[in-house]
Image (spheres, rainbow, N blue to C red):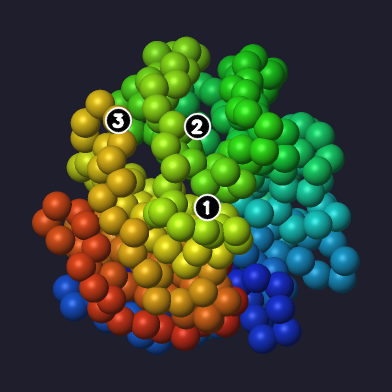
Amino acid sequence: MSDLFGYAGTYSSPEAPGTYRFTLDTITGTLSNAQLVYAQTNTKYSAFCNGLLATLTETNGKAGIALIDTSSAQGTLLDQLLTEDVTSCFLTWHHGCIYTANYHDGHVLIYQVHEGKLKQMRRIFVGKEAGCHQVLFHDHFLLVPCLCLDQIRIFDLDQDYAPVKQLDFPAGTGPRHGVFNGAHTKFYLISETSNELFTYQVDGLDFTLKDVCSILPEGDFPNAQAAAIRLSADEKNLYLSVRGADLIVVAGVSGDSPQILQHVDSHGHDPWDLTLVAGSPFLLCSNRKSNEILCFSLAQDGTILQKQSTLSIPQCVGLSLE
């Protein structure tokens, strides 16, 4: 069986009715069968775990998350909790719990899932309009890039989520998303405002900055905003999306410092999210403003070869795969 199911959240818009499921042929790279599985507003980010899809949601002036059983074609809503004033911008699973980051309200929410029901377990408040943009896990620590504060805040899960450290960035950097290597000895972060790639050597809570480089090509890109960052399974390449410039950037990271290998046209507008397909030489990209997901083929060295297929999904944003 070569087909793999994926999911795409959609940005709040009259033409974007909710979360979609789609099919990817992992042999040919063909995208097909876009179907609405959860009709709701502003489902920007979704994540799949153990047969359940968690997605952001918004209704009647309140926001939160929804839990969906996707075993049927239409999807079955199991539960939802609406405890936020505005929709979060990020969602992920960790050890059976769901974590969300809220950019405007400036907090991280933690939900427990039990027998198809959601329970809010914790609210970590950073600061209103802090720009909380992601949640990452490093041993028993939780990292929250805060775009508007130009900081990463670090909390200790074993000490009741007490704040233990922060990483500071120059004013106007806008740290957005990061990724660790498998051994958690390296940490890579992209900044939305300055469009830079930061590389750290990591030893416990010691983050030593080793390199900072621009991810943009030469020229003027006044509207450029870096968005997604993904690390290849062999840990040799990073894949970065840049909205405004409509670029996908490939950076080689097998050496002492990153090397920009490619600037590739995203073949659309506003490339928001990227997803690598495990075990297959493909990279998916959601171009929000051109309303489509694209599949790109990858060469053996991880560079991008060509566009394989396109699938229309309105205002597509966050991508996840089963």
**Residues marked 2 and 3 touching at CB (< 8 Å):** no
Instruction: Classify 10 Å Cα crowding around label 1: few (below 14), some (14-19), many (20 and above).
Output: many
Question: Measuring 87% from the left and 71% from the top, which residue is drawn there?
Answer: 60
Q: Which residue is mark 1?
A: 226
Residue 217 in the image, given as x and y percentages of width and height = 40, 54
Residue 195 sits above or below residue 143 on the image:
below
Question: Measuring 88% from the left and 66% from the top, which residue is drawn there?
Answer: 61
> From this viewpoint, which residue is outermost toward the left?
300
**Residues marked 1 and 2 touching at CB (< 8 Å):** no
Residue 138 in the image, given as x and y percentages of width and height = 47, 26
Q: Which residue is mark 3?
A: 257
Instruction: Classify 10 Å Cα crowding around label 3: few (below 14), some (14-19), many (20 and above).
Output: some
Q: Residues under labels 3 and 1: Cα distance? A: 19 Å
Secondary structure beneath dot 1 equals strand
Q: Residues under labels 2 and 3: Cα distance? A: 23 Å
Residue 212 in the image, given as x and y percentages of width and height = 44, 32
Residue 182, located in which quarter of the rendered image? top left
Q: Residues under labels 1 and 2: Cα distance? A: 21 Å
**Residues marked 3 and 1 touching at CB (< 8 Å):** no
Residue 316 sits above or below residue 205 on the image:
below
Mark 1 or 2: the one toward you: 1
Q: Nearer the viewer, residue 320 or 265?
A: 265
| Mark 2 or 3, nearer chain start | 2
- The type of residue carrying mark 1 is Ala
Q: Which residue is mark 2?
A: 137
Residue 134, located in which quarter of the rendered image? top right
Question: Measuring 76% from the left and 32% from the top, which residue is drawn there?
Answer: 126
Secondary structure beneath dot 2 equals strand
Residue 156 left/right relative to 279 = right
- The type of residue carrying mark 2 is Phe
Secondary structure beneath dot 3 equals loop
